[in-house]
Image (cartoon, helix red, strand yellow):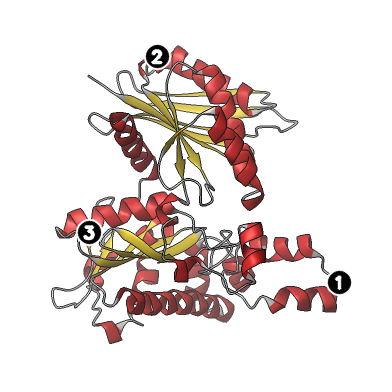
């Protein structure tokens, strides 16, 4: 008997969705809504992958998330799969603060708490809340479940999440490290444990996409991660600077008169690989390097330097290192990035099998040599499947 779960990821102007049969972990349908709230007509693209497969597209005005989801649900009713068979709706929720450490059944009280937490993620939580409200109104006969990007990191050790700030100020304003991409880090670390047949692994997961983060996981429990109060901290990313001297903000204000919003935009939207190389796509960066672009070469060196720095630090915190795993768009597909990072890790006994590293595959795979003291893996992430699995576990427990 199929047990479909609808997985929703609501952004400010878009919605990504999948319907997954959790009984066989089969993807039944997926889609994308774009230009919500735009003055121009938005789009809904719906793909059915089971029964009678097909791809469907409509253009219509999408003033808000409720109209957009109503259009999505109509796509299901017109083209399938059967929306009425859905047993739950799982919502990707970016910031759960320190309130939500696990998947949570969404109630009015939960929504109120998310609204209270919105200042921690002003760009992400409000559209997520809008999607939750709309979905509960349009599909109110099934449980709705919040899956939090921060949940995997809620129980970090205090010395890992505490900032060196005045304790009263930090407590009053909830200033601490929260971390993000938690659903991916949890899913991938669990897949690595299955792949290597060990639950006691000391492992590092490198989630490298346009947004990038790294985590240290000891026996299934996260002990540190690179993103902090916001997703700006940590690694070099597509447009985000990652770690930077906080004094830069005051300096830019004094020297150039830049206000807080201008500095925030600079660090989030015009820095990272874009600022260093002029490109956000790693493929374009590699092409520039191959063409002899010294700016791109330096940008890549900064990128791998920061990543190797974190791996070394996390290996120390873990007290050993069994596995390093690369995941997400860059981590899964950019063999050169894996090669350049691992070349910096010889002190840990890391030996990359360069031929295995060049192979492209959608399967989890080992890319280190048999003699490597640390297993190096590539494991495709699947946050939607992880959300569906967590939802099933929660439903079974209630």
CB atoms of marks 1 and 2 within 8 Å? no
Q: Position of residue 357 (x, y in %)?
A: 27, 67
Is 260 positioned to the left or the right of 87 in the image? right
Q: Where is residue 282 in the image (x, y as percent from the top left)?
A: 49, 63
Q: Where is residue 200 in the image (x, y as percent from the top left)?
A: 20, 63
Callout 2: 10 Å neighbours few (<14), some, many (20+)? few
Mark pair 1, 3: CA separation = 50 Å
Q: Residue at x 49, y 55 (%)?
A: 180
Q: Give the number of the disc on residue 365.
A: 3
Mark 1 sits on what residue? 257
Is 106 positioned to the left or the right of 387 in the image? right
Q: Residue at x 53, y 46 (%)?
A: 94
Return the disc, 1 or 3, that comes first in the chain's sequence: 1
Nearer the camera: disc 2 or disc 3: 2
Q: Split into 4 quadrants, where in the image is the N terminus?
A: top left
Q: Give the number of the disc on residue 84.
A: 2
Callout 3: 10 Å neighbours few (<14), some, many (20+)? some
Q: Residue at x 42, y 53 (%)?
A: 182
| Outermost residue toward the bottom in this view | 347
CB atoms of marks 2 and 3 within 8 Å? no
Nearer the camera: disc 1 or disc 3: 1
Q: In what element is the residue under mark 2? A: helix
Is 200 positioned to the left or the right of 232 in the image? left
Return the disc, 1 or 2, that comes first in the chain's sequence: 2
Q: Where is residue 196 in the image (x, y as percent from the top left)?
A: 16, 60
């Amino acid at each position: 008997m199929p047990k479909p779960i609808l997985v929703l990821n609501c952004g400010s102007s878009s919605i990504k969705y999948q319907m997954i049969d959790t009984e066989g972990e089969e993807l039944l349908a997926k889609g994308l809504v774009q230009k919500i709230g735009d003055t121009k007509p938005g789009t809904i693209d719906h793909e059915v992958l089971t029964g009678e497969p097909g791809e469907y597209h409509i253009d219509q005005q999408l003033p808000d998330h409720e109209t957009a989801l109503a259009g999505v649900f109509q796509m299901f009713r017109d083209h399938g799969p059967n929306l009425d068979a859905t047993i739950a709706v799982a919502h990707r929720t970016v910031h759960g603060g320190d309130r939500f450490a696990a998947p949570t059944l969404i109630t009015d009280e939960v929504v109120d708490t998310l609204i209270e937490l919105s200042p921690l993620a002003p760009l992400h939580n409000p559209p997520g809340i809008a999607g939750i409200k709309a979905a509960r109104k349009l599909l109110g006969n099934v449980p709705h479940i919040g899956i939090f990007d921060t949940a995997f990191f809620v129980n970090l050790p205090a010395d890992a999440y505490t900032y060196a700030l005045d304790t009263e100020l930090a407590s009053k304003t909830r200033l601490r490290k929260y971390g993000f991409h938690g659903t991916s880090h949890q899913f991938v670390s669990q897949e690595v444990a299955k792949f290597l047949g060990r639950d006691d692994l000391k492992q590092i997961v490198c989630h490298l996409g346009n947004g990038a983060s790294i985590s240290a996981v000891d026996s299934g429990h996260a002990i540190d991660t690179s993103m902090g109060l916001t997703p700006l901290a940590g690694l070099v990313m597509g447009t985000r600077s990652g770690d930077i001297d906080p004094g830069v903000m005051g300096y830019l204000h004094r020297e150039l008169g830049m206000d807080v919003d201008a500095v925030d935009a600079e660090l989030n939207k015009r820095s990272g690989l874009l600022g260093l190389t002029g490109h956000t796509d790693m493929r374009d960066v590699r092409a520039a390097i191959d063409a002899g672009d010294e700016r791109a070469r330096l940008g890549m060196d900064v990128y791998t330097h920061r990543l190797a720095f974190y791996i070394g630090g996390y290996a120390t915190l873990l007290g050993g290192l069994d596995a390093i795993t690369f995941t997400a768009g860059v981590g899964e597909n950019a063999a050169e990035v894996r090669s350049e990072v691992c070349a910096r890790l010889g002190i840990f006994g890391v030996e990359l099998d360069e031929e295995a590293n060049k192979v492209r595959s959608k399967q989890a795979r080992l890319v280190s040599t048999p003699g490597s003291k640390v297993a190096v893996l590539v494991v495709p992430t699947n946050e939607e499947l992880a959300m569906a699995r967590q939802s099933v576990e929660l439903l079974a427990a209630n």
